[in-house]
Image (tube, rainbow, N blue to C red):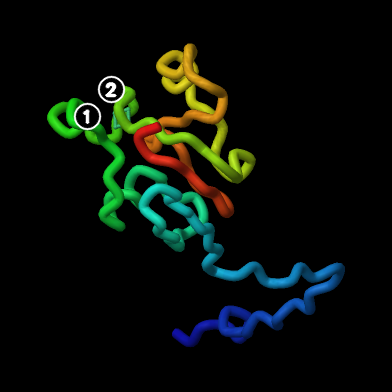
């Protein structure tokens, strides 16, 4: 039995109407300036600050933190950095940071909890 002609009809492409958005770039970058180390690092937007530091051999931890840290789980509070510039380009403080950094200056962040969305300058081990 032959299929009916209507089963094989091609679908005509529908012409798009309305305002077209300009295509977004596939990769948006953010730069991280590690002030003490004199290192400028380019990261993908939304990159984790602790991971970018480790990837670029930037030492975040003091002696105690090196011996015992939570590996970025937001539990130990040893990955503190001071944000010198670009605080507005980091993700908001997490609930854990609010607790752990309660008595610290507002410019302090936990690197493992901060996502980078634009240019920032940070000091490690403040
Ligand atoms: S590595 Fe433990 S809180 Fe950031």
Instruction: Provide residue 87's location: percent of width, then percent of height.
Output: 59, 39
The residue carrying mark 1 has its beta carbon less than 8 Å from ligand 1: yes
Instruction: Provide residue 92's location: percent of width, then percent of height.
Output: 56, 32
Q: Quadrant of the C terminus?
A: top left
Question: Relative to 93, is 29 above or below?
Answer: below
Q: Pick whichever of labels 2 and 1 is earlier in the sequence.
A: 1
Question: Relative to 47, is 24 above or below?
Answer: below
Instruction: Dividing the image into four quarters, tell me where ligand 1 lies.
Output: top left
User: Tag 1's secondary structure?
Assistant: helix
Task: Return the residue nearer the eye: 37 or 114.
Answer: 37
The residue carrying mark 2 has its beta carbon less than 8 Å from ligand 1: yes
Residue farthest toward the right in the current orientation of the protein: 18
Instruction: Provide residue 67's location: percent of width, then percent of height.
Output: 13, 30
Proximity of marks 2 and 1: CB atoms separated by less than 8 Å: yes
Say whether residue 56 is left or right of residue 64: right
Instruction: Provide residue 74's location: percent of width, then percent of height.
Output: 34, 27
Residue lying at 51% horizontally and 83% vertically, measured from the top left: 3
Between the residue at mark 2 and the residue at mark 1, the CA separation in whole angstroms equals: 8 Å
Residue lying at 51% horizontally and 58% vertically, measured from the top left: 31
Task: Return the residue nearer the eye: 1 or 21.
Answer: 21
Residue 65: numbered disc: 1
In the rendered image, which residue does mark 2 sit on? Answer: 76
């Amino acid at each position: 039995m032959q299929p009916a002609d209507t089963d094989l009809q091609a679908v005509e492409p529908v012409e798009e109407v309305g305002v077209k958005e300009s295509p977004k770039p596939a990769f948006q970058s953010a730069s991280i300036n590690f002030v003490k180390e004199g290192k400028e690092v380019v990261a993908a937007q939304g990159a984790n600050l602790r991971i970018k530091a480790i990837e670029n051999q930037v030492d975040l931890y003091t002696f105690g933190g090196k011996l015992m840290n939570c590996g970025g789980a937001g539990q130990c509070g040893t990955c503190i950095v001071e944000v010198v510039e670009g605080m507005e380009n980091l993700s908001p403080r997490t609930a854990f940071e609010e607790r752990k950094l309660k008595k610290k200056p507002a410019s302090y962040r936990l690197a493992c909890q901060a996502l980078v969305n634009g240019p920032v300058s940070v000091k490690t081990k403040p």
